[in-house]
Image (cartoon, rainbow, N blue to C red):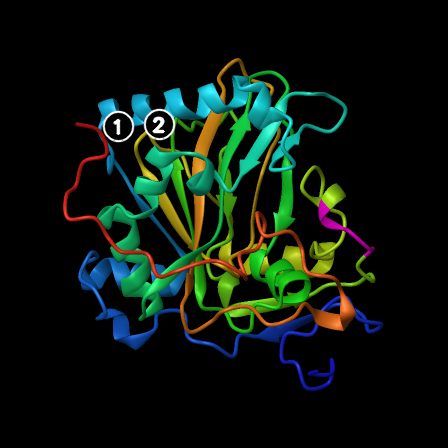
């Protein structure tokens, strides 16, 4: 087992918070493993840690996906499953995990070449789905997601070795300045924020509703924002946001009348599969962190989800 002293991304140990320079590439294999993105788009992703592609999916495709997500949120058999996460203090569904296993259309979505080939190009290898979920932020009552780096959690709680994964958010509703859109800190992916606080047992049961461990301290967060600012991902439904696993991000609560929903996939390199969690933690459930049953994503031949 690697000790905290040997781990370049040690976090949640007995030491104080720290800002640590990234040790891994952002774009692997010079961005030439696939050709979904232009050289300029690859450079933008490398510089900022994220990329917004607008109007990727048609209105027809978006409506089909929305229909599937809404059907799942109303299905008592799914809502009762442990993969369905409710809002703090209510029974409203906040997220449904492992949607690529629960739903055939979303299974096809993960293989859509408009998504999968971007992941393969940026990660420089074949990829698999580390995690998938549908996120709902209903009007008037959708809660915030506090600032965090996904990699910090995936490294500590899931044993992800390196920063060779990315997230892909397919917008199913228009994201505007009022309905709690995703916010990202440009350039923050170049710094790893080591967080304080020992991880509680079965931390995921609380963190999926409201994360309190593995979040950056205010001083580190302020330094990142002073350097890079904050970029809000405002775009129409059908757009897609790709962001590096270590990019600092979060979103405000939604007190507007307009709901915000998306389908969210994490592509991880087949060369970056999970080790045991850090510090003797028990592995999180498979629906949160795939480690037992997975295979490389095979991109579909066509660019259409619905016939």
What whole-number distance in Å separates the C-alpha atoms at marks 1 and 2?
6 Å
Instruction: From this view, report whether residue 97 is shown above or below residue 203.
Output: above
Q: Residues within 10 Å of mark 1 (few under 14, many from 20)?
A: some
In the shown orientation, is residue 271 left or right of residue 292? left
Instruction: From this view, report whether residue 200 is shown above or below residue 256.
Output: below
Instruction: From this view, report whether residue 70 is shown above or below residue 148.
Output: above
How would you classify the magenta stretch by its main secondary structure? Answer: loop
**Total numbered labels:** 2
Q: Position of residue 162 (x, y in %)?
A: 52, 73
Q: Position of residue 84 (x, y in %)?
A: 61, 32
| Nearest to the observer: residue 175 or residue 76 | 76
Whether residue 203 is in magenta: the answer is yes
Q: Which residue is mark 2?
A: 65
In the shown orientation, is residue 147 left or right of residue 246? right
Q: Position of residue 132 (x, y in %)?
A: 48, 45
Q: Which residues are magenta?
A: 200-204
Q: Secondary structure at mark 1?
A: helix
In the shown orientation, is residue 213 left or right of residue 168? right
Say which mark, if any, is on residue 61.
1
Most extreme residue toward the top is 257
Most extreme residue toward the bottom is 6
Residue at horizontal 76 percent and vertical 51 percent from the top: 203
Q: Are marks 1 and 2 in contact (CB under 8 Å)?
A: yes
């Amino acid at each position: 087992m690697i000790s905290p002293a040997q781990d370049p991304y040690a976090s949640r140990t007995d030491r104080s918070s720290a800002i640590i320079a990234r040790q891994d590439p952002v774009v692997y294999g010079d961005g030439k493993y696939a050709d979904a993105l232009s050289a300029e788009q690859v450079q933008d992703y490398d510089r900022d840690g994220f990329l917004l592609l607008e109007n990727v999916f048609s209105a027809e495709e978006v409506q089909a996906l929305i229909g599937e997500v809404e059907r799942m949120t109303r299905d008592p058999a799914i809502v009762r499953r442990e993969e369905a996460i409710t809002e703090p203090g209510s029974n409203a569904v906040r997220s449904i995990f492992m949607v690529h296993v629960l739903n055939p259309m979303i299974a096809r979505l993960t293989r859509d070449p408009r998504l999968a080939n971007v992941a393969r190009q940026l990660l420089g290898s074949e990829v698999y789905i580390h995690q998938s979920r549908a996120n709902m932020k209903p009007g008037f009552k959708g809660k915030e997601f506090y600032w965090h780096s996904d990699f910090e959690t995936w490294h500590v709680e899931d044993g992800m070795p390196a920063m060779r994964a990315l997230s892909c958010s397919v917008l199913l509703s228009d994201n505007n300045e009022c309905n709690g859109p995703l916010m990202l800190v440009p350039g923050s992916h170049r710094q790893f924020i080591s967080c304080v606080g020992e991880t509680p047992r079965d931390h995921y049961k609380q963190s999926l509703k409201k994360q309190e461990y593995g979040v950056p301290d205010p001083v580190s967060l302020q330094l990142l924002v002073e350097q890079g600012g904050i970029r809000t991902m405002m775009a129409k439904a059908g757009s897609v946001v790709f962001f590096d696993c270590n990019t600092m991000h979060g979103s405000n609560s939604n007190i507007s009348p307009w709901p915000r929903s998306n389908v969210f996939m994490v592509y991880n390199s087949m060369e970056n599969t999970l080790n045991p969690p850090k510090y003797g933690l028990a592995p999180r459930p498979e629906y949160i962190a795939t480690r037992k049953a997975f295979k490389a994503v095979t991109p579909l031949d066509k660019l259409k989800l619905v016939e």
